[in-house]
Image (tube, rainbow, N blue to C red):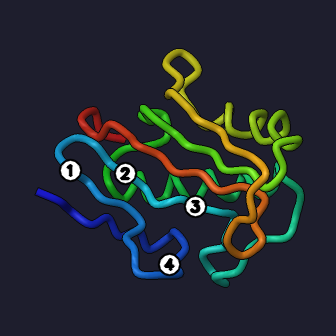
Amino acid sequence: MRDVIKASDAPKAIGPYSLGIRIGNLVYTAGQAAVDPATGRLIEGDIKAQTEQTMKNLEAILRAASTSLRHAVKTTVYLHNIADFAAMNEVYARWIDPEKPPVRTTVGGLDLPLGALVEIEVVADASAGG
């Protein structure tokens, strides 16, 4: 059974896709960027500010699915500039379980939607709750 995740405190989808899907105990998020949920616009700021907002958006989606970034099992990070890796990683590390970090793939040198500096998608385990 496939359940669509709706999160009122996350940005609305900007296309024909779901913010998240739950299948069994796994939650898959769409890629999220640093969009302010209140305005629907990309926030201004450097890679750290954009990563922080991106993680807040992901957390809102996962919370709506009764899990959190602490239960992430796989993430994919897309960077406009791979030189931003260390700064992104500094913020990212505060949001995930340091004892059991998820597997991760990072890709750089991309033109991202809305001119974002970072986009992140997550697969999380929802069996333990948030």
Q: Residue 57: give x, y in percent of width and height.
A: 57, 60
- Disc 1 secondary structure class: strand
Q: Quick check: 34 left or right of 70?
A: right
Badge 3, how many Cα within 10 Å: few under 14, some, many 20+?
Answer: many
Q: Measure the alpha-carbon separation of dots 2 and 1.
A: 8 Å
Dots 2, 1 in contact, CB < 8 A? yes
Q: Residue at x 70, y 80 (%)?
A: 41
Q: Amino acid at mark 3?
A: Gln
Q: Measure the alpha-carbon separation of dots 1 and 3.
A: 19 Å
Q: Which residue is mark 1?
A: 23
Q: Quick check: 82 left or right of 63?
A: right
* First in sequence: mark 2 vs mark 4: 4
Task: Please say if 48 is above or below 12.
Answer: above
- Disc 4 secondary structure class: loop
Q: Which residue is mark 3?
A: 32
Q: Measure the alpha-carbon separation of dots 2 and 4.
A: 16 Å
Q: Residue at x 74, y 50 (%)?
A: 79
Q: Measure the alpha-carbon separation of dots 3 and 4.
A: 10 Å
Dots 3, 2 in contact, CB < 8 A? no
Quadrant of the snapshot with the C terminus: top left
Q: Amino acid at mark 2?
A: Tyr
Q: Which residue is mark 4?
A: 12
Q: Measure the alpha-carbon separation of dots 4 and 1.
A: 21 Å
Q: Amino acid at mark 4?
A: Lys
